[in-house]
């Protein structure tokens, strides 16, 4: 994808400046990307797990009538990102566009050659469930906000059961798809009614024979004991991942108290801004979601946080990252020590990080901390801080 021109005479190389990606006396040149003109045949609209609409352009090479050949491969599709991009690029069926591969890998449009009769416009209702779509303020995202939308269901339920969420071993996307297809799951609350259909599931062999079916049903029952921060993560509320859920549930005794919180109250939690607060408030005030939460509660899921064991506030206001391994503590133990002493445990180093606690085989996080000037602590130094 390029060439390097090297000064052959070694003595002269020092007279040429060095760059960030080459030494002195070496100059790199990139070849212009290979381009083809394509004709847009269709624009597919899909709905992702979070309800966000995605747009994909389908096209052909007008010279051959087949997919375009670029960098040794046949290309017939490219992402169109969002409605703003489509409008800016003048994308529509019948239009002609330059196509290249970004980094010689990702197909990408590079300008309009011949404008279409009509620029494509996103639908007003979800192409799957027919519910009205919503475009968020100050973003280019268009979403289906119907939690029961079939397009979102499989990925939503599989996310609910995943490792960082309810951690139901064995209930992955393939099995979720099968249970949805057979009519046993219409939303994630239905997971906890599968035991009522045990004999049918065994007879149909959807999960497997008796042993595998009982093993999965036991895993589902065990998941009811998870702490509410895992359940909050599993609900798939936008902008609320694992770490944010833990942070939020440090301020509430149970999930129902969070459900009653107002937007202004939520914004008082550190690192919870107006957008995230609105997402949380809207989720817990949607009638369909209220019904789902109530079903989960009646199914016996744990809504109560364990009693807080805050030892001190010695780390109050401090953001700390833990990396590497320690002889007497697991990573989870270390993070619990940080939180119980009033600090905030995060998984990545940034300019906002106050300390990095580094153990054996610290790796890239240690390198980043050093480059950003973040103070690095040994396990002994950390323990001294919380004495």
Image: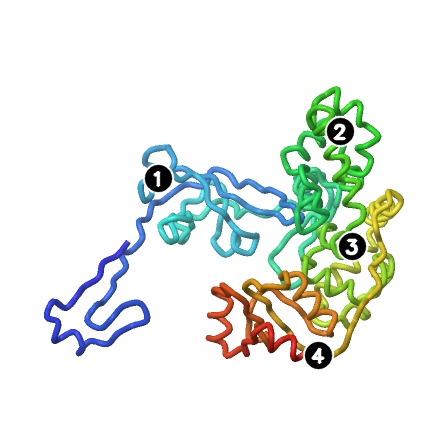
Give residue 183's position: percent from left, percent from top: 75, 29
Residue 387's tag is 4
The answer to whether marks 2 and 3 mark residues whose Cβ atoms lie closer than 8 Å is no
Q: Mark 4 or mark 3, which is nearer the start of the sequence?
A: 3
Q: Give the structural element (helix, strand or loop) at label 4.
A: loop
Give residue 300's position: percent from left, percent from top: 86, 45
Give residue 149's position: percent from left, percent from top: 72, 41
Q: Mark 3 or mark 2, which is nearer the start of the sequence?
A: 2
Distance Cα–Cα, label 3 vs label 4? 28 Å
Q: Which residue is mark 1?
A: 73
Q: Give the structural element (helix, strand or loop) at label 1.
A: strand
Q: Is residue 196 left or right of residue 18?
A: right
Where residue 346 sits, quadrant-wise, is bottom right
The structure residue drawn at horizontal position 50% and vertical position 79%, both measured from the top left corner, is: 373
Q: Mark 4 or mark 1, which is nearer the start of the sequence?
A: 1
Q: Give the structural element (helix, strand or loop) at label 3.
A: loop
Q: Nearer the viewer, mark 1 or mark 2?
A: 2
The answer to whether marks 1 and 4 mark residues whose Cβ atoms lie closer than 8 Å is no
Q: Mark 1 or mark 3, which is nearer the start of the sequence?
A: 1
Crowd band around label 1 with a 10 angstrom C-alpha radius: few (<14), some (14–19), many (20+): few
Residue 183's tag is 2
Q: Which residue is mark 3?
A: 227
Q: Mark 2 or mark 1, which is nearer the start of the sequence?
A: 1
């Amino acid at each position: 994808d390029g060439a390097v021109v090297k000064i052959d005479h070694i003595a002269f190389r020092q007279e040429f400046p060095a760059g960030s990606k080459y030494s002195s006396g070496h100059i790199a040149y990139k070849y212009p990307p290979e381009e083809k003109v394509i004709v847009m045949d269709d624009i597919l609209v899909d709905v992702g797990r979070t309800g966000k609409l995605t747009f994909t352009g389908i096209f052909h090479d007008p010279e051959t009538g087949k997919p375009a050949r670029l960098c040794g491969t046949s290309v017939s599709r490219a992402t169109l990102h969002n409605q703003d991009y489509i409008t800016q690029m003048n994308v529509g069926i019948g239009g002609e566009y330059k196509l290249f591969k970004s980094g010689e890998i990702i197909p990408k449009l590079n300008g309009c050659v011949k404008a279409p009769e009509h620029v494509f416009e996103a639908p007003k209702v979800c192409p799957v469930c027919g519910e009205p779509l919503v475009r968020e303020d100050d973003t280019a995202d268009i979403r289906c906000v119907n939690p029961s939308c079939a397009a979102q269901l499989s990925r939503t339920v599989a996310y609910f059961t995943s490792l960082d969420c309810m951690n139901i071993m064995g209930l992955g996307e393939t099995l979720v798809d099968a249970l949805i297809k057979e009519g046993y799951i219409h939303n994630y609350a239905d997971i906890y009614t599968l035991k009522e259909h045990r004999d049918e599931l065994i007879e149909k062999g959807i999960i497997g024979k008796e042993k595998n079916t009982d093993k999965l049903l036991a895993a589902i029952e065990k998941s009811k004991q998870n702490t509410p921060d895992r359940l909050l993560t599993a609900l798939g509320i936008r902008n609320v991942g694992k770490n944010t859920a833990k942070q939020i549930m440090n301020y509430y005794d149970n999930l129902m108290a969070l459900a009653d919180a107002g937007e202004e109250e939520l914004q008082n939690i550190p690192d919870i801004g107006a957008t995230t607060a609105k997402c949380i408030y809207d989720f817990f005030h949607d009638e369909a979601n209220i019904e789902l939460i109530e079903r989960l509660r009646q199914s016996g899921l744990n809504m109560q946080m364990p009693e807080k064991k805050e030892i001190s506030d010695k780390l109050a206001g401090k953001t700390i990252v833990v990396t590497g391994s320690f002889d007497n503590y697991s990573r989870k133990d270390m993070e619990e020590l940080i939180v119980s002493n009033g600090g905030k445990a995060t998984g990545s180093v940034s300019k906002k990080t106050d300390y990095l606690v580094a153990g054996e085989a610290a790796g890239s996080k240690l390198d980043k901390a050093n480059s950003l000037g973040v103070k690095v602590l040994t396990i002994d130094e950390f323990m001294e801080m919380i004495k």
